[in-house]
Image (spheres, rainbow, N blue to C red):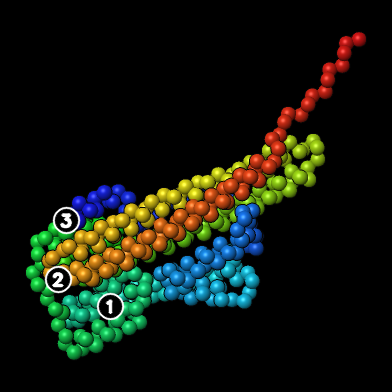
């Protein structure tokens, strides 16, 4: 059963809670927007690194509004389009706001549909609205755009909701195990809902729709949370870099009497930036471990589905599991790349700190010999 394949993963698989990046005190001075995304002294071009991040958003972000805006930045002829897109107040934040507004509208439509229909009067509309309410952002958007009308048309033709056959006890046990040991918070919640309702239709609904949708929700939440934290700490490190550059300039221009104090302040500023980069790099390594555990868990689900023989559509479940495992493997590769990038940021900021000479006590004047 699934318990033997998932229990070892249950301690790590909280995929809606991303491993947190380090929290550091917010600097008093904010970095200018033009500087926020161009601060590193590492060998690679910062624009290239940020283009890679924007391409990831264009390919993988769950919000079509963000995907569209990211593609616009990528194909723009403006040289700074990519860095402007990720800067505070830029295209990403505007697209995120539009996505939030659209998501709120979709949630309102779906919740009103659920509250104004019943499984008796509008069985297909009610069933599909409840299903959509637990779906991904894309599933909700698709339901509001086209799915609701399709369900209404089916209800108008008096199409009954097909009753599921009696579900095997083995499959019910499977869902019960998933409710406790499933690979992700959304998956566990979907299994728990199926058990709480407990009808044959609810168990079938889990295997046919809810499981795959919940798996997508886990991945969606992971990616969105990770992006928000990534941008937060990129901007924060950029601010620390600006402060360190200002402190270094003050040191270089200081008088001989003030030079030791200025050197200590500049070294401290660069070390603060380096410490933040190092801690963030460690968090990326932890995120990599989480994604690896998820990929392995879904590979185990695939292996189980290939050998399963109950009445569920196990070939379709196996295909979904293989695709989900591959998606989590992509997250592993991304986390590895980000860990390497933050290692380079640490090395460059640490090198700047070490390049400043350690301050030495000011020499005291020699005592005058006694007459």
Q: How many marks?
A: 3
Please tell me whether mark 1 sits on a helix, a strand or a loop. helix
Q: Which one is earlier in the sequence, the residue at label 1 or at label 2?
A: 1
Q: Which residue is mark 3?
A: 1
Q: Badge 2: how crowded within 10 Å, few (<14), some, or many (20+)?
A: some
Mark 1 burial class by Cα count in 10 Å: few <14, some 14-19, many 20+: some
For label 2, the residue is: 201
Q: Residue furthest top?
A: 371
Q: Residue at x 64, y 53 (%)?
A: 41
The quadrant holding residue 16 is bottom left
Rendered position, 27 above or below 204: above
Give the CA distance from mark 3 to mark 2.
Answer: 22 Å
Which numbered disc flags the more N-terminal residue, 3 or 2?
3
Q: Which residue is mark 1?
A: 113
Residue 183: quadrant of the picture? bottom left
Q: CA distance from mark 1 to mark 2?
A: 21 Å
Image coords of residue 245 (percent x, y): 68, 50
User: Which residue is painted at 57% across and 51% down in the image?
Assistant: 345
Q: Secondary structure at mark 3?
A: loop
């Amino acid at each position: 059963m699934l318990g033997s394949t998932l229990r070892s993963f249950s301690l790590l698989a909280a995929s809606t809670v991303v491993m947190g990046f380090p929290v550091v005190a917010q600097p008093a001075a904010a970095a200018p927007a033009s500087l926020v995304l161009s601060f590193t002294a590492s060998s690679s071009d910062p624009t290239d690194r940020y283009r890679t991040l924007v391409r990831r958003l264009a390919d993988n972000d769950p919000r079509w509004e963000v995907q569209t805006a990211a593609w616009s930045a990528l194909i723009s002829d403006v040289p700074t389009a990519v860095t402007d897109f990720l800067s505070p107040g830029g295209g990403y934040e505007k697209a995120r706001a539009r996505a939030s507004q659209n998501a709120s509208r979709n949630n309102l439509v779906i919740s009103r549909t659920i509250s104004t229909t019943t499984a008796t009067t509008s069985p297909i509309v009610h069933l599909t609205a409840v299903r959509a309410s637990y779906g991904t952002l894309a599933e909700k958007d698709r339901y509001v755009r086209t799915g609701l009308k399709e369900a209404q048309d089916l209800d108008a033709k008096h199409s009954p909701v097909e009753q599921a056959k009696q579900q095997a006890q083995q499959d019910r046990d499977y869902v019960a195990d998933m409710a406790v040991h499933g690979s992700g918070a959304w998956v566990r919640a979907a299994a728990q809902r199926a058990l709480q309702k407990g009808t044959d239709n609810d168990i079938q609904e889990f295997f046919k729709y809810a499981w795959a949708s919940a798996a997508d929700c886990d991945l969606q939440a992971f990616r969105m949370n990770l992006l928000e934290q990534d941008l937060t700490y990129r901007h924060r490190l950029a601010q620390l870099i600006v402060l360190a550059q200002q402190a270094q300039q003050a040191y270089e221009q200081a008088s001989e009497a003030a030079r030791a104090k200025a050197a200590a302040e500049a070294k401290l500023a660069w070390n603060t930036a380096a410490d933040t980069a190092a801690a963030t790099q460690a968090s990326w390594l932890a995120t990599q471990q989480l994604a690896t555990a998820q990929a392995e868990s879904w590979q185990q689900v695939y292996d189980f589905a290939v050998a399963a023989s109950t009445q569920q559509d196990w070939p379709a479940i196996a295909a979904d599991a293989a695709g989900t495992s591959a998606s989590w493997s992509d997250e592993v590769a991304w986390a590895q790349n980000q860990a390497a990038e933050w290692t380079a940021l640490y090395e460059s900021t640490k090198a700047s700190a070490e390049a400043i000479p350690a301050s030495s006590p000011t020499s005291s004047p020699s005592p005058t010999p006694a007459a």
